[in-house]
Image: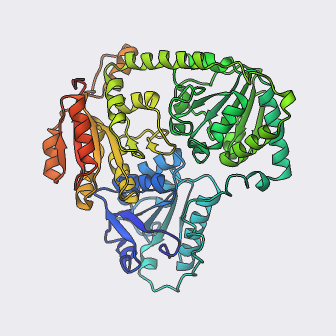
Amino acid sequence: MLKDRGVDVIFGIPGVHNQEMYRGIEEAGITHVLARHEQGAGFMADGYARATGKPGVAYVITGPGLTNIMTPMGQAYSDSVPMLVISSCLDETAAKKGQLHQMKDQRAAAETVCDWSEEARTAEAAYALIDKALTEFGTQRRRPKHIQVPIQRLETPAATFSMLSRQDGGFGTVRRLPQSGALDSGLTDLRRAKIRQIAGRILRSKRPIFVFGGGSVGAGGRFGPAVDVLKQTGAAAFLTYAGRGILPAQHPYCFGATLARPTSEAILRQSDCVVLVGTDLAEVDLWRPTAGHASDAIVVNTDTDTDVLIKEHPSSTHIQEDALRFLEGLSNVFAKWPAETRREPASEWTEDEIARMRTIWRAEVDAERPGIVPVCDSLRDCLPKGTMIYSDMTQFAYTAKEVWDMDRPGHWHHPTGFGTLGYATPAAIGGAVARKGKPTMAIIGDYGFHYTMQELGVAVELGLPLPIILWDNGKLKEIEESMVRAQIAPNAVVARNPDFCKLAEAFGAHAAAPQTLDEMQDTVRAAFNADGPTLIYLTPQISG
């Protein structure tokens, strides 16, 4: 059934409770990737989903298998990643105690970190729940689901599932919108009227600002409607970390992914019209309580999630619409707007003031974490076009997200909301499995690498040409600096590290410790053509 619905890869670990889920898996034509820990399996499924747009599927056992994958499920929930976790469960828990892998309420535990968690007590229920999950991945906000099946049900013969037409690629494929130009005709009259109203507000404003988030990735690219709308209005723009690449690198009216800069609040306060596209401006986007725009500014929020739309603002306008459809509709209205009513110049923003602020903010980032910006620049310049990057909770990634302009959207993935350590290595493995023949890279810190280092064995086993950039500053430096700012004597921030290069070689991976930026570039280029993963060990002492 999963193969029929478009699933071609499953990440997981078999056990005595869920072994029946593996019966026939190869005959179905599905590839199973054996993780070294259920947390790794979950992050691999997450990375696969982010790379393909299809749901990542994971198999785990009862009890500890499920609890081990709950951290990846929480990360996927926070970052709106489609993941389907299927586990076994005990047949009876109320009247029978002391069983292997027993939990008080496994289903309820899973539900705390996913969209929903249900138990399928018949084969027909399992089929129906899988279809429900896959359908919702294409029609609602994409968040993880969990289905558990009792062990006896897994061992019982079942009726054949219903076949689906594969003309649409199955429920598990990316939701496809109409082609550009057909979008406006696909809008309802009410939404078309609302978009015209919003367009009028934008054109009447003196300093409009768009904020593009990860939910607008489908509207990005060098020739996407996000670019058209800025050109038509003279509006400025900010990007969230997940929104990088929606506008071309160094777009003259883009402030970049700099919302976390404290003085960005002053810039937003200058705007009389703020348009939020595909973002809810969460704490992890801003690192302050509010964006800071003026109380009398018009705020337009477009999102497919009603939870985001109900955020209150005195002058907010909400429209529940896909970002691509919304921006295409806006662009069509602007193109037809009477020329005699347009203001010249289109807005009061200037390229010079935007470039000046970007220069100031880049200098601030460099001063806060000295030495990392040049390494970021050098690493970016040696990557093949279209490289997909998975990063971890490390100072290198925190710096890069603010100064590294992406050349295309949806190609940098970070554990933004839940903020778990150990994400990058297994997630990049999942991405590399999905992107055979395309460049994929991981960026992780020394401490985070400890969480999931065992998954390096999976990359070796699969022969993935995966560069893993390991940034070793010898401690939990971000936490140490936070303790110092809080006037707490730094404690428990230093852990003994192994020789990471020897560790990687013990797994059968390649390893290198370049001492200069030129050596680093040569090593990274070679890693993309290697016969397996390469751990590239960097320290703050690397020289130019």
Q: Is residue 14 visible?
A: yes
Locate residue 343, reporting x and y percent.
Answer: 80, 23
Locate residue 160, reporting x and y percent.
Answer: 52, 85
Q: Is residue 2 left or right of residue 432?
A: right
Q: Quadrant of residue 16?
A: bottom left
Residue at 33% of width from left, 18% of height from top? Answer: 370
Q: Is residue 17 left or right of residue 123?
A: left
Residue at 77% of width from left, 22% of height from top? Answer: 344
State which quarter of the image contains the C terminus. Answer: top left
Return the residue found at the far top.
487
How is the structure coloured here?
Answer: rainbow
The relative height of residue 381 versus residue 155 in the rendered view (above or below) is above
Q: Is residue 308 left or right of residue 522?
A: right
Q: Quadrant of residue 315?
A: top right
Residue at 70% of width from left, 21% of height from top? Answer: 271
Locate residue 193, reporting x and y percent.
Answer: 85, 44
Q: Quadrant of residue 221?
A: top right
Locate residue 371, reporting x and y percent.
Answer: 31, 21
Residue at 66% of width from left, 31% of height from top? Answer: 210
Return the residue found at the far front.
339
How many marks the image carries: the answer is 0
Pick the front one: 365 or 148: 365
Q: Is residue 262 visible?
A: no
